[in-house]
Image (spheres, rainbow, N blue to C red):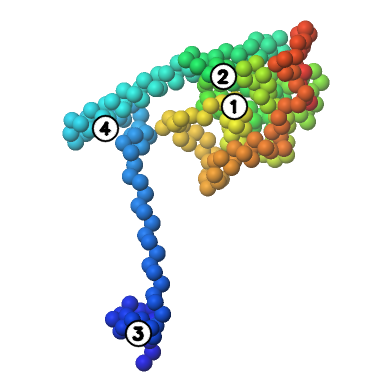
């Protein structure tokens, strides 16, 4: 009679007891169940109007009170964010506007900003008719609407920097608190760039603040790109974008301690 030592039978148990069969492998412990979602987790994806409907259908007064309190806090937070969201689009500028609209604008602190971090200003230098420049401009417009607390401005490349080579366009110059935080040249020249890469670069360099929660209507605002890399970790994308060949940190640019009388000092870039 053949014996299957893996069978869970009384006969096999008796054989193990007398050392005829080896002990059974211990059963691996079951993984713990995932933590239950918190009250905030359950309500986080609903808009204030949806929360009002949910509170009206709450099973008891206590649940209705908690949902109403959460809704009021949400409205308060959104009003506070709306007050800070004073941009929301791309502002075209000329060379003569640069100091006021870029350098000086980046020194303005938000209301209630105890850290006095200034304002993130992203200056986009482009060229009409250049495919990679036009695609980048589409991404810039989308991000300007997505991050209305940061200021996005645009200017034709050689109108900002005379004789700027086409090989350097499109170009991003990122300011905060009156200083250049980063320069990015020839964005998309090496390969086609996705909006997530530009967004990650702006977050890493401090040009924009990552949203605490994305509004329900903005979850899939860039549906054309979202399906390609859903399984890639977001932090890895940020590090990749920030250290890419096009994402160069500034070198030999005007620092905060340098005193220059020439009005063109704001255009002393590393090209």
Q: Earlier in the sequence, mark 4 or mark 1?
A: 4
Name the residue that disc number 2 marks.
117
For marks 1 and 2 on the same chain, the one whose residue lies earlier in the sequence: 2
The answer to whether the residue labelled 2 contacts the one labelled 3, judged by CB atoms less than 8 Å apart, is no
User: Of the residues tagged 3 and 1, which is closer to the observer?
Assistant: 3
Q: What residue is rendered at 38% in x and 89% in y?
A: 2
Nearer the observer, disc 2 or disc 4? 2
Question: What is the spatial separation of the Cα atoms under label 2 and label 3, in whole angstroms?
Answer: 75 Å
Residue at disc 1, secondary structure: loop
Image-quadrant location for residue 132:
top right
Residue denoted by label 4: 54
Where is residue 243? Give x, y as percent: 67, 37
- Residues at marks 1 and 2 touching, judged by CB atoms closer than 8 Å: yes
Q: Which mark is residue 20?
A: none
Q: Residue furthest right?
A: 163
Q: CA distance from mark 4 to mark 1?
A: 37 Å
What residue do we see at 28% from left, 25% from top? 69
Q: Is residue 124 visible in the rendered structure shown here? A: no
Which secondary structure lies at badge 2?
loop
Q: Quadrant of residue 127?
A: top right
Asked whether, in this view, residue 230 is left or right of residue 75, the answer is right
- On the picture, is 35 further left or further right than 173? left
Q: Quadrant of the N terminus?
A: bottom left
Check contact, mark 3 vs mark 1: CB within 8 A. Answer: no
Inter-mark Cα distance, 3 to 1:
69 Å
Disc 4 residue crowd, few under 14, some 14–19, many 20+, Cα 10 Å: some
Q: Quadrant of the C terminus?
A: top right
Which mark, by number, is residue 18?
3
Disc number for residue 206? 1
Secondary structure type for disc 3: loop
Q: Residues within 10 Å of mark 3 (few under 14, many from 20)?
A: few
């Amino acid at each position: 009679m053949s014996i299957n030592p893996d069978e869970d039978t009384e006969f096999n148990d008796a054989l193990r007891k007398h050392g005829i069969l080896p002990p059974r492998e211990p059963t691996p412990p079951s993984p713990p169940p995932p933590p239950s979602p918190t009250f905030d987790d359950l309500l986080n994806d609903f808009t204030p109007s949806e929360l009002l409907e949910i509170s009206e259908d709450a099973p008891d007064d206590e649940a209705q009170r908690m949902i109403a309190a959460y809704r009021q806090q949400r409205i308060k937070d959104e009003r506070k964010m709306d007050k800070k969201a004073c941009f929301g689009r791309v502002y075209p500028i000329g060379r003569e506007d640069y100091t006021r609209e870029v350098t000086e604008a980046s020194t303005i602190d938000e209301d209630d900003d105890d850290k006095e971090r200034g304002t993130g200003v992203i200056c986009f230098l482009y060229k009409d008719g250049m495919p990679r420049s036009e695609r980048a401009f589409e991404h810039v417009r989308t991000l300007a609407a997505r991050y209305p607390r940061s200021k996005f401005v645009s200017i034709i490349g050689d109108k900002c920097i005379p004789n700027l080579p086409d090989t350097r366009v499109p170009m991003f110059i990122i300011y905060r608190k009156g200083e250049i935080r980063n320069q990015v040249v020839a964005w998309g020249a090496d390969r086609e760039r996705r909006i997530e890469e530009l967004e990650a670069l702006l977050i890493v360099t401090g040009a924009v603040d990552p949203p605490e929660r994305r509004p329900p209507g903005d979850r899939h605002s860039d549906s054309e790109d979202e399906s390609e890399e859903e399984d890639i970790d977001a932090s890895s994308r940020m590090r990749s974008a920030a250290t890419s060949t096009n994402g160069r940190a500034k070198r030999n640019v005007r620092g905060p301690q340098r005193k220059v009388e020439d009005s063109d000092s704001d255009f002393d870039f590393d090209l």
